[in-house]
Amino acid sequence: MSLSYNIPFLSILLAMVSAILVPLLRNGRWALNLVRGVQLAAAAASAYLLAELSLAGESFTFQMGHFPAPWGNMLQAGPLEAALALTFSLVMVLSLTGGARELRESLRSDQLGWYCLLMQLLYGALLAMVYTDDLFTAYVFVEIAAVTACIAVAARESGRSILSAIRYLIFSCLGSGLILLGISILYSITGHLLFDSLEGAVAALAESRTYFIPLVVSALLMTLGLSIKSAQFPFHAWLPDAHASTFTASSAILSGLVLKGYLVIILKLVLRVFSPALLVSICMDDLLFLLGLAGMLFASVAALRQEEVKRMIAYSSSAQISYIFLALGLGSTEGLIAACYQILAHAMTKSMIFLGAGEMIRASGGHYWGELRGAARLAPLGGLAFTVGGLSLCGLPLLAGFSAKYCIAGAALEADWQTFPALFGLAASSVLNAMYYIPAILAIWGRGGEGEKLPWKWEREGALVLFLLCNVVLGTAFGPIRDLIEQGLNLFYSNFQN
């Protein structure tokens, strides 16, 4: 077995082991450097794996501990999984790098070590969700991600952050209970937890109509639970306060990565367990589509009414998550490709926006738009990151958001009755995005800012520059990236073309 076949397992193992080690380092700076070094190494390994698998047109499974089921479990890796792992690794290390100064100033050295432990556990859980081929293992790491994210929200130790973390935990526990109940029902009627085995068992049950109602109920429960955890409308009430009350790095990671991890599990359920054809037969695709369409509009309207910058960005995140649900609800292969493209584009774009907003808040000392007037003049690169990210989500060509919307629109044109509602939703949501992002951009570049211009810091500015470059790459390399996603889906997911 070549070294590249061990990269998924080694990446997860290294993240978990380093998470245990960082609290032992007395210097918080060393702890932060260690976790960023591990994430950077995993990003490089994921890039190598992506290049090797995409060029060879291959995918593989990795048997953990070389034990068969039910004692062991499996990892799966193909070009799509490697691309997701690379994106998640880059966003993680850039978010921690861009927000490092705020963390060092706000947390004591020992507290910073424990914060790094949380972030590294969260990172390992996200990688496991990307690579796992086992439903219960996915659930375990979903819970690890949820618990660490809740504690990260409370890390600022203010009354508001603790209240937001409690609300987050309540919603998360509700979603977890529904997911676990759905897994229990599915296991009781199939006797399997590995995706490979579940795929055949569910197909046989659907064909024979045996245990059909429990099968439908399990699909509904797991989808609903993951929707709650991913802040899909109307289950997004916990998200704005969680983002507004925590550190900028935490906000960037929560919005850019944590929400996407749950969506990756939904994608695996669609492709590896229930199949698009079965979901269409029980109208699950229509439910996902309607949830996505409603979320795109209502969350955008809510963002339009916000005066606090982080709350506005949080509502925008809920709207952008809805694009993914709408694409999945189209019930087509093109819709699945579009959903994956939106996952990549939003992960890069929204994390960059939060870091840019954090720089302007730091420079001006204000959290509301009235206090942020002229803030981009005090933090030029932060203002540029916010501007490019906002225009990207509005659909400006050559940026990541435009390519994702173009991909969704192309999928909508091949749909059935969903074509007109989907195109209307895309257009209306883009207009609403422009209605709150463009006035905000004009305000931050206008005159009236008070405060001192932020000094140049290589780690902060370097992270923002790399985010900007990644956004442009996702916007301009539409064809190759789309082909890579399609190749990854075709290689591993037999249900993709069914």
Image (cartoon, helix red, strand yellow):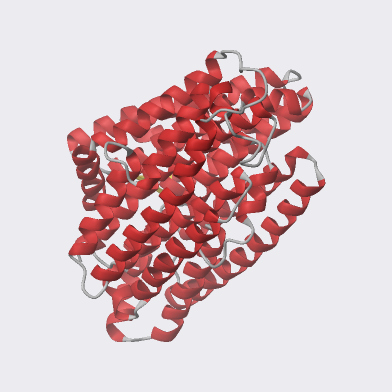
Q: For the N terminus, which image quadrant?
A: top left
Please count the marks in the image: 0
Is 439 above or below relative to 461?
Answer: below
Res 180 → quadrant:
bottom right
Do we see residue 331 in this rendering? Answer: yes
Q: Position of residue 261 (x, y in %)?
A: 48, 50
Direction from residue 387 to residue 327 in the image, left or right: left
Q: Which residue lies furthest to the right in this view?
A: 159
Is 305 above or below relative to 94?
Answer: below
Is 157 above or below relative to 486?
Answer: above
Q: Where is residue 245 in the image (x, y as percent from the top left)?
A: 70, 44
Q: For the C terminus, which image quadrant?
A: bottom left
Res 209 → quadrant:
bottom left
Direction from residue 403 to residue 145 in the image, left or right: right
Q: Depth check: 492 or 174 in front?
A: 174
Do we see residue 337 in this rendering? Answer: no
Q: Where is residue 36 in the image (x, y as percent from the top left)?
A: 55, 24
Direction from residue 19 to residue 72 in the image, left or right: left
Residue shown at the point (33%, 46%) measured from the top left = 395
Q: Depth check: 13 or 322 in front?
A: 322
Residue shown at the point (57%, 29%) measured from the top left = 374
Q: Where is residue 126 in the image (x, y as percent from the top left)?
A: 50, 44
Residue shown at the point (51%, 33%) measured from the top left = 92
Residue shown at the point (32%, 58%) measured from the top left = 427
